[in-house]
Image (cartoon, helix red, strand yellow):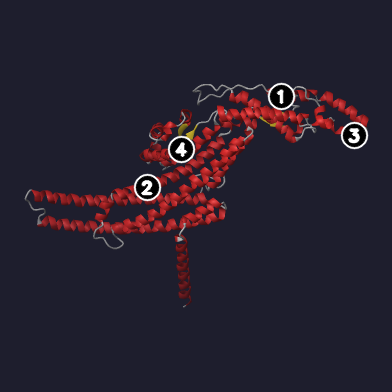
Amino acid sequence: INTYLRHGDPGVVRFVRNVLKSASVPFFKQVGQWMSAAELKDPFQEFFVVAKKSVPADRLWQDRYVLNWQMVPSFIHKSLAARILQVGKSINFIHKCCRKARRGIQGEGKEVDIEIADLKIEGLEDLSFADVVEGAGRRDKLRRVVDRAADAINSQLMGMMRDSFQVRKHCMALKKYLLLGQGDFATRLLDLLDDELSEPATKVFRHNLVSVLKAAIQQTNAQFEDPDVLKRLDVRLLRSVQRDSGWDVFSLDYHIDLPLNVVLNKNAIDRYLRVFSFLWRLRRVDHCLVKCWSMYVANSNALWRATQGDGGVGTLGAVLKKGYLVRNEMSHFVSNLTSYMMFEVLECAWADFDINLNKAKDLDELINAHEQYLAQILSGALMGSEKEDGLTSDGGVLGELNKMFDLILKFVKLQEHVYDAALVDLKTVQDEKLEVYKRQQKGEWGKSAKQAIQGDQKRSDHLSRRKKVYEQVYDRLLSLEETFAHLLTGLRSRLSAEHSSSDAQFLDVRLDFNEFYEEKRKKESRLQRDREIGAYASSTI
């Protein structure tokens, strides 16, 4: 009917306008009811706002009420229709979600005291068709009324989210614990879980891990955290496959309820857990290298005493020196990657999110700000598309990083075996010397001639076997060093090709700040070229 207002006959226009004034009375009455009390009385589905049933709790805001664009009148602009929808959604959200919420989780704690201000907006109850078609002064009345209602309800809703439900506090808690931003807590948790998670996944039980989590909280600054946050922090065991260890199935978790789960929905928590899996593995690798270094320092004097008289490649001294150099390379890589993740990625993303959180004027802007925050973290964390799983992806930068983490864990395990074997040999020699000393103190011979000959023969055989073992270990260290350098070169190539951000490029520079790997790559290229030329020359003779 509205199209006939553009008819050339003034009489037809007046007639159509009178018809529309009467016909649109129920429509504008429904608009007023929707924007004042979120009431939707539309048995014949004639209104442009549609209510859906069976919507998940964390999708109430996004999916409970939607626009039916075919029912939007031609005299209502699409942006105005979206604004009207948002006003009613906000009122309904406060009634249905905020008033039912409680401080704490799973029904614990005090109920949130929510007072809804009087939202009687001037002009909302007497809207009519004249407010959108007649005169310049009245034509914008509907938009002005909608804007006033939107500003009032959005201001109240955002105040609740920031103050009553403290959305920033919970986002910060997720950053501290699921993104491991609380350094002392993450380090202590790794220390306490080391033995527990080294067991097969089938022998790891959630109640034991929860006890360890509580101990880590009590022994770090996390004990001063808000009790509401600590109640939500929990342990999750992932689905295991054959030969998985506890490290492969452990994850922290954070429980979210209404109305926070509209912002921190299941999809968002899943992305937090993806980043946690990556950061947890990075922290584990760093922890293993530190433990390897601690073992070396604690036994350095004894180990170097055991190498006295060594010489050549197949000796303990050569193995210790090569292991020291390889560990330094790996520590340099891990420390730079950790610094990049904690500062260039997490802290920068949080700084931007904090600004957008304070600037958000409605719930949609708050949700979008949080989505951008997570997208920035995933992109900066070199995790590629969201279809890739954080630990099983074999392609891209993340695939290269996982291979390097596996290689570092193999190196640490090899070093531990070397240290253990060397200390056992040293203890055996010391025990023999102590036995000789005790006999001499009693006035006896330290060793008889026969014992000396047998001891020398036994020691010679043992040293011969050990030399073969150390030669194999040295070759294995050379292989690990070469593979690590190759993987690092591949990682740097992928950083240059797949990530154009300045932070990722700067990480590339930091990983090879003195061009050590670049020179090694050029040297290998020259050797490979010389071998190919030599092979070609031999084949042509």
Q: Dot 1: few (<14), some (14–19), or many (≥20) neighbours within 10 Å?
A: some
Q: Between label 4 and label 2, give the one nearer the viewer.
A: 2
Image check: 266 left or right of 301? right
Q: CA distance from mark 3 to mark 1?
A: 35 Å
C-alpha distance separating marks 3 and 2: 83 Å
Give me the disc on residue 121: 1
Residue 320 location (% of width, % of height):
32, 56
Q: Residue furthest left?
A: 443
Q: CA distance from mark 2 to mark 1?
A: 64 Å
Label 3: which residue? 7
- Answer with mark 3 or mark 1, whichever residue precedes in sequence: 3
Q: Which residue appears farthest toward the front when viewing the image?
A: 137
Residue 341 in sight here = yes
506, 389: nearer the viewer = 506
Which element is circle 1 on? loop
Q: Categorize mark 4 by other alpha carbons within 10 Å: few (<14), some (14-19), many (20+).
A: some
- Circle 4 sits in a helix, a strand or a loop, which is it? strand
At mark 2, the secondary structure is helix
Q: Label 2, on which residue?
A: 290
Q: Nearer the viewer, mark 3 or mark 1?
A: 1
Q: Quadrant of the N terminus?
A: top right
Near-viewer residue (452 or 215): 215
Q: Amino acid at mark 3?
A: His
Percent across and percent down for residue 208 are 38, 33
The residue depicted at 74 percent of the width and 35 percent of the height is 78
* Mark 4 → mark 3, Cα distance in angstroms: 68 Å
The picture places residue 34, in percent across and down from the top left corner, at: 71, 25
Residue bearing the label numbered 4: 251
Q: Amino acid at mark 2?
A: Val
Side (left or right) of 293 relative to 534? left
Q: Nearer the viewer, residue 134 or 504?
A: 134
